[in-house]
Image (tube, rainbow, N blue to C red):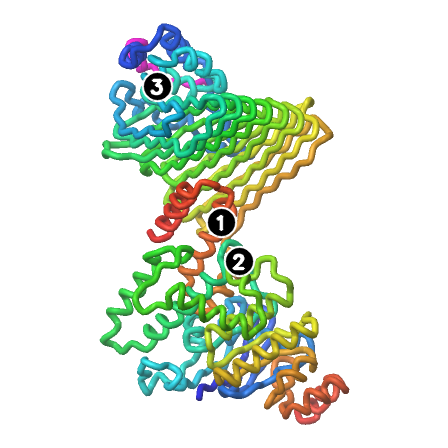
Amino acid sequence: MARLELRNLHAQVAEGGEKILDGVDLEVRSGEIHALMGPNGSGKSTTAKVIAGHPAYEVTDGEVLVHLDEEEFEDIEIPEDMRTVNLLDLEPNERAALGVFLGFQYPAEIEGVTMVNFLRTALNAKLEEREELFEDDEGEEAEADADDEDAGYDTSPMEGDVEEGDVGVAEFQEIMAEKMDQLDMDTEFAQRYLNAGFSGGEKKQNEVLQAAILEPSIAVLDEIDSGLDIDRLQDVSNGINALRDEQGAGILQITHYQRILDYVEPDHVHVMLDGKIAKSGGAELAHQLEDEGYDWVREEAYETA
Amino acid sequence: MSTQVHANLTEEQVKQISEGLDEPEWLLETRLDALDALEGLEMPDVIRTPGRNWTNLYDLDFAGFVDPLNAAEEKDQVGPEEVEVMSIAEALDEREELVREGFGSVVDPEENYLTALSTALFSTGTVVYVPEGVDAEDVTVRTRMNSQSLFNYTLVVTEKSSSVTILERQTTGDEVDGERYYSGLVEIDAGENSNVQYGSLQNVDEETYTYTLKRGHADSHATINWIEGNVGSRLTKSSVETHLQGEGSESQIVGAFFGHNDQHFDVAARVWHEAEHTTADLVTRGVLDDDARSVYEGVQDVGSDAWDTSSYQRENTLMLSDESEADASPKLIINNHDTEASHSATVGQVDQQDLFYMTSRGVSPRMARNMLVEGFFVPVLEEIAVEEFRDDLSDLVAERLRE
């Protein structure tokens, strides 16, 4: 079972900007759903971005650890001393390769890159990166070679030729069609450019689709419920539940509203205030927040302090 | 500033080139006039911003790299049977009247110093004649330059209600010592209701300076569509232009360039709306890496008689390094109020949010950047109807990204 652990995480806007995270402690295990709630500006999205390695933020203290579950890595043997990894030492693509997925509140719109080519490239890149990350010392030379290869690629990703060990075009199209069907998405999306011209709801659905295809151990979903109509909210929720139920992923569901939690029932609810977790509880906490707002949590926090 | 770079060019040399092609007297006269005119002619216009000429043609060592009598090339010029695809020498032999009428009718040989130099010294070329009512695809002109300098001339004449697709490629072959110069003039005379698609892909080596001027005259309801791809060359000075002279005529100019190292691209797309109900669409995309520089000028000129004009222009440059530089000057000149027109230009770097989004999915930064660059060219590639050309251009882009 994989586990994401935030220990005393402090972060600020890069290059000496405003301090945002002020000692976040949080733990998410695969198979669990955690809701991270809080008012605007409390640090929820920053937490997500810092976990994924967004360059706009600078970590000033603390750790983001992933405790890996070897069973999830199939053919790769993870050396004992590498089963706990500090994500802060890794690039965003390496973090993704270890099974950490960030679902964006406002995903980028990327013209000219089709969904199907991007996702197939991402899936293959993730598999290759995993192998590289856990090569032992003897493998360093191979890693250097792999880095050279990474300086370009043998074939254009737009053409989509297959290298040995990669998921091929036909195989990938099947995977994608199946996942799209589960999410009630039109298969035409596969040939559209990544998020370009998508409605807000389609973008959110697409984020869940990507998670379903990349099969993360931990998915951090940043306000993936905002701006959805009821049908789309149900589709997205079904997708999130499937990530947990079918793939065993741990979910960190960042949200502003209780609404999605009617469909995605959290095991744990955390309230973030002023850059730290002010209160944690079960699903009932979300209802209480919906009814009473955040002020009482703030008061409690002051009293404790 | 007048140009005095060619004191070493002689009438004898020009006569010798002309004799080699067994030319008629009128063409020799045209050449000699152009040679005479050199002294008083200016270089073609370049974009100027305060304190800076973006392209400095006056400093090029024309005397050093123009070698008039030693032109060498390999050329394929092929087309389907119903179209006449001739070398310039064949055309002068078999269709002299056509060449005489067409030569210099679209591009004035003495328009500037470089057109005059080309006219005086050209030694190779292609004439494409499409008779009335003929539909022809796959006219291909491949020029591989093997000498220090090469001056190329192309004339395309399409008769009423004909159609032709022409693909031209320029590359360099045998290596030579020092810098090189390639010059190409293209004139298209598109007859009434005819349709010309002219694609050009320049991929010469980076020791070569290139000057190309491609211009077409479109008669009533004629269409001239240009595709201009520039990947090679040390310095590219290229202008693609259409005069929409006939009612209902149309033109699309699609351009793409990809520069790296210290390549310099000075590209222009220009259209003149001179008649009623004419339509133009100008789309250019460029990518610059390393120390490469580009300057783009786009002109949509709507004349006073051009009622009901539609004219659109977009230019976008993507810079992959902090050292690359780009300037763009889209111009819209409107002398008739019955016009629907727009123009825009952007210059920017790879979007960091886009990069983060892609890398957060496991794609390496380099691969993400490459996908973004390939994706950036897609809107231009989508405008190219000829599959072979589209494939060639996207292959060259992918090859450049692999370097």
**Disc 2 residue crowd, few under 14, some 14–19, many 20+, Cα 10 Å:** many
Are the residues flagged by discs 1 and 2 in contact, CB closer than 8 Å? yes
Pointer 1 chain:
B
Give the quarter of the figure containing the C terminus of chain A.
Answer: bottom right
Query: Which amino acid does the dot numbered 3 rest on?
Result: Ile
**Do the residues marked 1 and 2 share a common chain?**
no
Query: Magenta segment range?
Result: B1-13
* Residue at the disc numbered 3: B88
**CB of mark 3 within 8 Å of CB of mark 2?**
no
Q: Is residue A31 above or below residue A175?
A: below
Residue type highlighted by circle 2? Tyr
Q: Residue at x 58, y 71 (%)?
A: A184
Residue depicted at 35% across the width and 22% down the height: B86
Expressed as whole percent of the image width and height from the top left, the position of residue A161 reads 35, 59
Q: CA distance from mark 1 to mark 3?
A: 36 Å
State which quadrant residue A39 falls in: bottom right
Q: Are marks 3 and 2 on the same chain?
A: no
Picture quadrant where residue B127 is located = top left
**Looking at the image, which is closer to me, A279 or A174?**
A174
Query: As shown in the figure, which amino acid type bears the numbered disc 1?
Result: Val
Label drawn at residue A94: none
Asked whether residue B59 is drawn in magenta, I would say no
**Which of the numbered marks, if any, corresponds to residue B378?**
1
| Looking at the image, residue A14 lies above or below residue B201 | below
Q: How many marks?
A: 3
* Residue matched to label 2: A193
For the N terminus of chain A, the quadrant is bottom left
